[in-house]
Image: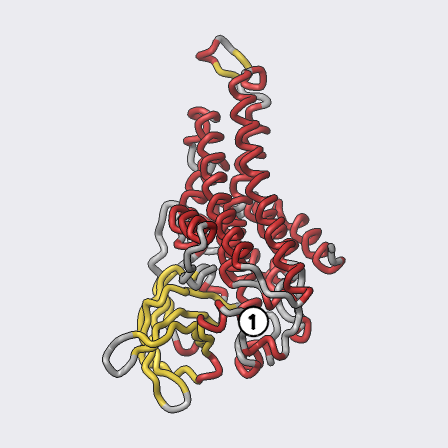
Amino acid sequence: MSDSSANKVLEAVQDLLPKIAARADQTERDRRIPDESIAELKEAGVFTMLQPKRWGGLEADPVEFYEVVRTIAAVCGSTGWVSSIVGVHPWQLALFPDAAQREVWGEDPKTLVSSSYAPTGRLTPVEGGYEASGRWSFSSGCDHCSWVLLGALVMGPEGKPTDFLTILVPRTDYQIDDVWDVVGLRGTGSNDIVVDKVFVPAHRTLSFNDVSALRCPGQTENTAPLYKLPFGTVFSYTITTPIIGIATGAYNAHVERMRERVRISYGGQKVAGDAFAHVRVARAASDIDASWLQLERNLDEEMRYSSAGEEMPMELRLRARRDQVRATERCIEAIALLFKNSGGHSLKNGNPIERAWRDGNAGSVHAANDVERWLAMYGKGEFGLPIEDAMV
C-alpha cells in the first residue's frame, strides 16, 4: 500500500531530477556527489525512508524506497547508487542494539552512514568490545557521512576467525583514503576506509549469524515488518536497483535520440523506421521491465510474510536472490543492445548512453552480482540440498 509521505519523497525527487542530471558531468569530474545534491536529497527525505519512525524516519515500504532510487539513477547513475547505498544504512542500523542507534541519531536523526562490508579488517576481543584495524575499500558516499559500517572477522587466539561482525565506527576513528579513480560510477566517491587499533564497544557490533537468522537486537524497539526482512534481499536489491535505473535512463535517452536520428550510410533512412531497431528496443524494454517487476513482486511477498509474523520461506529468499542477479544481467544486456543500436553517437564522452554503459557495467561487478553463484544456490535449494551461505 502506498504511503503519502513516501509519495511526497518521490514527488520531491522528481522535481530535483533536472538539477541532478545537469550535475552529472561535474559528479564524474569531481569523483563524488556534489554537496548540493546530497543536501537536496536529504531535504527531500530520501535518506530517512527506511529509518525507524521513532528516529524521525518514514519506515516506508521498501518498494517505494527503491522506486525513488530507480528514478534518481535514471538521470545520474552515481547519484542513484549513493542514494541507494547510503539510504539503506538506516535500515541496518535499526537492527543494532538501541545504544548504537542513540549514538548515531540521538543528536541528529539525519546523520548519514557509509559502509564497506567485505571482512578485510580484523577484530581482536578486548574488555568491553573489540580492537579494530584494517583497510576497507569501496565505501560509496563516505565523504558525506559521519559514521561507517564495516565488515570484520573476529580472530581467535589461534589466528582463526570465530565470527563475522558488522561494526559501527564514528568519523573521528577512521581515515578516508582518496583512491577512487575508475571507469564507471566515477561519481560515487567509493574510497577506502582506514582504521588503526580503534576500540569498538560491543553495542556497536552486529553478528551476521543474527542477521541471517532474522533475529537482531534492534528488533526489540523497531518492531515494524520492514526490520524483519532478510539482509540478503534488502542489501542485494540496493545494488541492483540503481542498475535498473541506469538501464531505464539509457532506454529513455536512446528512444528520444533515435526518433530523429538519420543513418546517412543507409541512404538517409530514419532509425525510427528500421524494423530491426524496433525489435532491439522491444527486447531492451522487456528486459528492463522484467527486472523491476520481479524485484517488486519478491519484496511485496516478503513484506506479507513479515507483516503476518510468519517464517520467511527459504524458497522465497533464494528466489529473491535469483531474480536479483538476473535483473542485473538483463539490464546489462539491455544497455549493451541500446549502445550498439545507437551507433557511433554513443561513443562520445558525456553521452547518456555511453555513461550508462560504463556505470551499469561498473555496478555489475559488485560482489552481490555474482550471477553464477546465486543461480547455482537457487538450484541447490530446488534440489533439496542444504543452503549454507548467509547472504540469502
Pinpoint residue 214: horizontal percent, then vertical percent. Answer: 54, 69
Q: Which residue is mark 1?
A: 111
Pinpoint residue 229: horizontal percent, then vertical percent. Answer: 58, 63
Amino acid found under the numbered disc labelled 1: Thr
Judge the density around disc 1: few (<14), some (14-19), many (≥20) Cα neighbours within 10 Å. some
Residue 170 visible, this angle: no
The image quadrant that residue 166 belongs to is bottom left
- As displayed, is residue 169 above or below residue 346? below
Residue 279 visible, this angle: yes
Secondary structure under the numbered disc 1 in the rendered image = loop
Residue found farthest to the bottom: 127
- As displayed, is residue 75 above or below residue 149? above
- As displayed, is residue 153 above or below residue 286? below
Q: Residue at x 40, y 85 (%)?
A: 129
Pinpoint residue 232: horizontal percent, then vertical percent. Answer: 49, 60
Pinpoint residue 3: horizontal percent, then vertical percent. Answer: 74, 58
The quarter of the picture where the N terminus appears is bottom right
Residue found farthest to the front: 384
Residue found farthest to the right: 4
- Left or right: 55 with respect to 326? right
Q: Residue at x 37, y 83 (%)?
A: 130
